[in-house]
Amino acid sequence: MIEFRDVRKEFPDGTVAVEHFSLVIPSRETTVLVGSSGSGKTTLLRMINRMVDPSSGAVEIDGENVLEIDPVRLRRRIGYVMQNSGLLPHRKVVDNIATVPLLNGTPKRQARERALQLMDTVGLDRAMADRYPSQLSGGQQQRVGVARGLAVDPNILLMDEPFGAVDPIVRADLQQELRRLQQSLGKTVVFVTHDIDEAFLLGDQVVILQQGGRIAQRGTPAEILAAPADDFVATFIGADRGKRELRVREVGGRRVLVDGDGRPAGVLTETP
Amino acid sequence: MIEFRDVRKEFPDGTVAVEHFSLVIPSRETTVLVGSSGSGKTTLLRMINRMVDPSSGAVEIDGENVLEIDPVRLRRRIGYVMQNSGLLPHRKVVDNIATVPLLNGTPKRQARERALQLMDTVGLDRAMADRYPSQLSGGQQQRVGVARGLAVDPNILLMDEPFGAVDPIVRADLQQELRRLQQSLGKTVVFVTHDIDEAFLLGDQVVILQQGGRIAQRGTPAEILAAPADDFVATFIGADRGKRELRVREVGGRRVLVDGDGRPAGVLTETP
Amino acid sequence: MNLIADALAWLFSPDRLQGGNPIPLRFGEHLFYTFLSVIIAAAIAVPLGYVIGHTGRGRNIAVALSGAARALPSFGLILLLVLLIGTTRAPLAAVIAFVLLAIPSILAGAYAGVEAVDRRTIDAARAMGMTEWQILRKVEIPLGLPLLIGGLRSAALQVVATATLAAYVGLGGLGIYLFRGISLRTYDEMLGSALLIATLALALDTVFALTQHLVVPRGVTAGRVKDDRSTSSRRRAGAGTPAVTGKG
Amino acid sequence: MNWLVGNLDLIFELAVEHVRLSIPPIVLGFLISIPLGWLAFRFRLTRGLLLTVAGLLYTIPSLALFVILPPVLGISFLSELNITIALTIYAVAILARSVADALDSVDPAVRQSATAVGYGPWRRFWGVEFPLAGPVILAGLRVAAVSTVSLVTVGILIGVESLGYLFTNGLQRGILVEVFAGLIGTMLLALLFDLMLVLAGRLLMPWTRASALTPSPSARVVTAVQV
Amino acid sequence: DPLAPDTGSGGAGNDETIVVGSQAYYSNEIIAEIYAQALENAGLEVERQFNIGQRDAYIPSLESGEVDLFPEYTGNLLQFYDPEATATTPDEVYSALTEALPEGLTALEQSAATDQDSYNVTAAFAEANGVSSIADLAGIPDLTLGGNAELEERPYGPAGLQSVYGVTVGFNATGDTTVDALVEGQIDIANVYSADPRIQTEDLVTLEDPEGLFLASNVVPIANADVADEISDVINAISEAMTAEDLVDLNVKSTVDEQSADDIATEWLTDKGLLD
Ligand SMILES: Nc1ncnc2c1ncn2[C@@H]1O[C@H](COP(=O)(O)OP(=O)(O)OP(=O)(O)O)[C@@H](O)[C@H]1O
Ligand SMILES: Nc1ncnc2c1ncn2[C@@H]1O[C@H](COP(=O)(O)OP(=O)(O)OP(=O)(O)O)[C@@H](O)[C@H]1O
Ligand SMILES: [Mg+2]
Ligand SMILES: [Mg+2]
């Protein structure tokens, strides 16, 4: 369990990124922080592995304040996946995946063996092991990033818009892959995105943030959709534009669900 | 009306970007070309204003082959909006918008007056007129780009992923704005995106492209959704993942529509 | 530091205004050669650089050329040209050498300036219906100006340095004191004139730096709205300054 | 031509001497520039100061610097040390900026991600930032090396022998070929240094050779414009 | 003190190696090379420090023992130590020089070969103005003298011409291009070393110097006193053997035949039977 207790972060230049933020992130589930640019998602995520330290308040992992853990040791225990993968361009794929085990002193041979297994886990052909990141497609790079995040078998996996930069089709693939992985691995995943659809797709718990890290609403996707807490949430999830208010229309003998603008969202398969 | 007749484009390096492409783009409607990266969308769009000339086949505007029109004159008659706006960084916003009228010899005063009106049209505060592009946010820059595209009151507006680089919330705003504009202006808009949701939102006609500019399916959004032509289209629009197959579930007394994975997509407002 | 005091005494002695080698004369010569050569070189290199930058053609040749120019020892080049053209036409030989040495930096400044303009901006300009000439004149030249001035700046400094060496073949200029000082081992003269030359170079550099600063188009300097942490605003490393060419 | 045939040994000896004079400034300049470039990269304030001073020093004509340095540093005018120091200063002036720019060019995302996976600052610098800065540093090093080789010739004017000897001696004796040989010799040496650096770069930075699977977006834009 | 010689190499303390120096002037370098080869032939260890520049640059090194042996010219060197010197004939100059040399430096035997500053005009100029001696220049208006930059400051420079011969000249620092400048008419009078082959090849007229503005300047080896005895036999033999014609000849070999100093020296020593 990760707990934020009345956390506040003011950057040296005076920007207050987050204020009065409290949240419990349950273990072995996926929590998605979603919000528009500058709402403090990244800042919050990074407080967990001490890439950012709170100005006041506390972040605890299983009851232990992270400030009492040496940052380098802490980070080596927590998986971190970010947009553009953050791979080391000068290391081969397999060495990228093995980075943290190697930093931890795992023998090279063993680390590489584990890295190859992880490539299977994330659905990457082992033939890519000796390529450099630049020789992979964006989607493949993200898979390597996920594999690297899993390399030390961490309990916690932090993901900062990991699929933000890839093509929608590949993104849908990666999202499915992550769901599959999560079902079998059961990590505590904290996922940041600004795409509400992605948040609804991946999150067991979704936290919608406003500027300054204010929580606009927190709950399961269905809860949020069924009852948006306020206008902000309604706008954010598109409910105010009628995007979420679907009506049924017959097109070519099938019942197509269309939104307030008459734009189709899907096909109805089963009547209540 | 714009018509592509069996168009083919081979670049000097041998890449065949588009082959056997034929399409009619009706006037005063929005046609969206959608497809993943490298499918030839940009190439096709740029054939309309002769930024790219076809290797064979013909592109006609109202029955006239564009190859017979002087490219510079042709381009001044066609609005073009692209990702990252392509604004001139050393010109103020108002001068950027007025660029083409000024090139056409419109007196400076008149051109600026019209530019200010256009700022209203696209929802930009006139106070920004004297700023430089770098002093605007990404979304504002795109609005300037649209205003510039409209400056000569063209019949045709080409838009190449115009909202690809902005934040989803701003993007939703710009999309709404464009719909509103289009309703009142009635231009022939050719819009390129690789986001299927955007295509369904904006397109009167949607053309789904595969590599090499092969048309996988063409039709209204509802037609495509109701009957995806093949597996490729089904995958592309998410139908194969059950994303488009919605079922109704009761949550907190409301009827929430959920997809194959149990992820909510909207709320049902009206039974058939 | 006593030597420096002597050097300054030499430099500011009233004798420096009289005799066969008054400083104002030599100073004027030095500047004259510098500006003459830079102007001739610019007349050749700027149009060429614009053509290369605009069309992208001949770029590899230009890059190779400026690379080779960096390796060219300017002192040797002058002596070679003097021998080729004739010792008595040393000024002509020297000016040719200066022009040859100045061309690569100016060329690099001109084409790099054009090239550094965001391709998307140019693409948009073309799509709007600008002619190639308009693209060059209204977009590429104004946006490339700072880099061009940068090129002129390194060219001028290169020539100032080389003109110093040209005193060896009797060209005059400020180098004359330096060589005489070295031959006679009169340290006040040597150091005094070295300081004078360094000052001239620094002053010229400052003037160019200010100009370069002034010609940056407004809007390029205008502050970003916020958040310049974003990676997109990072400039390509090295794109800011045209390649440094050799020095004398 | 007569001269050339009879003086191949001389040219060779001078070339060896030239190389010997060229190496210390390049190596020293490189070593000194790493901490300086890092300082300039890390702290805005030092950056301005450092790069300005470097730029000013680079501005001073070489012969003038050869003359100004001895009294400032209290070394002998005739001494080879004088040339070595002056040329090291020029190399530092080029390289400190290169190193700073190079460190700047390292994708912040990569730096962040290295920190996030648990690199300490020291390891991160040597294991990630420095190697990734490699290509840009190499570019600076090539400029510095070539310019050093070319500047060594000026040393002849204060009596330090190199291929520059062929310039003055050739002029006195009126032998065109001799001056020409000096010129070509110097350029060949510069080319040799350049080539070795490029090769060293290939060897030490294999990832830069790996061709990207898909052309980068910017590369595509460039090609698109050439239609 | 930057004028102090470098103590990095050579030095008087080093008995094994004889450091031979030379000016940055090809002719001087040939003589130095002859010395060096002869010493090597005699079984001594030799280090060459050629190309040290002008007299003012290398004398300190010689005095300090950084350089052990240097080919010099009697008149010029005497004037360096004693600008007021009045001696003119070779022997007078030589003996005055031995007096004037500071302790620690020894002049070995002088040679018959001379290479002294001289004023030259073109044959056409000589004929047109009827000059054969420097004295004849007096009264000719708008004369320009050309030579190294430092000539302007020398006692025999413009000031000396004025005071000794009443000749008024302007000055142009033509450096290594002096002869060409004369031929092309940029200057009227050129200071050329008397052994310069171009005096013949370019058909120049060397003006007589009846008042002894220039001192006789014979080639003379200057040695550090510490090594003078050790090397005197070898070096004196060279001075003995070298004639004025030899010197011009050596210079011709260098500039016209483009031979290297090394070859020229070996050839000369072999011809004179000084190598075994
Ligand atoms: N190092 C920093 N120094 C100063 N301000 C910062 C810093 N990092 C973040 N900020 C500011 O803090 C606020 C929150 O930033 P944060 O990066 O957490 O937002 P985000 O929700 O992740 O946004 P995005 O979706 O754009 O990634 C923003 O206003 C940002 O400008
Ligand atoms: N100037 C060019 N030279 C060579 N190949 C090109 C050029 N422009 C485009 N291509 C190639 O043509 C194909 C189609 O490119 P195009 O830019 O039209 O794709 P797109 O659908 O717009 O892709 P994206 O979504 O990435 O913008 C690609 O394979 C691309 O690499
Ligand atoms: Mg973020
Ligand atoms: Mg495209």
Image: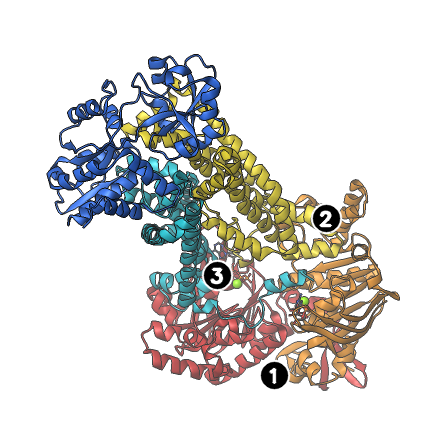
Chain colours: A red, B orange, C yellow, D cyan, E blue
Chain to which mark 1 belongs: B
Q: CA distance from mark 2 to mark 3?
A: 36 Å
Where in the figure is residue B131, as x and y percent of width and height? 65, 45
Q: Quadrant of ligand 2?
A: bottom right
As helix, strand or loop, the secondary structure at mark 2 comes to: helix
Query: Which residue in the structure is indicated by mark 3?
Result: D107
Question: Mark 3 Cα within 10 Å, few/some/many (few <14, many 20+)?
Answer: some
Q: CA distance from mark 1 to mark 2?
A: 56 Å
* Rendered image quadrant of residue D196: bottom left
Q: Is residue E18 left or right of residue C11?
A: left
Query: Which residue in the structure is indicated by mark 2?
Result: C134
**Res C229 visible:** yes
- The amino acid type found where label 2 is placed reads Gln
| The one of B106 and D92 positioned closer to us in this rendering | D92
Q: Mark 1 near mark 2, Cβ–Cβ under 8 Å?
A: no
Query: Which residue in the structure is indicated by mark 1?
Result: B261
| The one of A203 and C41 positioned closer to us in this rendering | C41
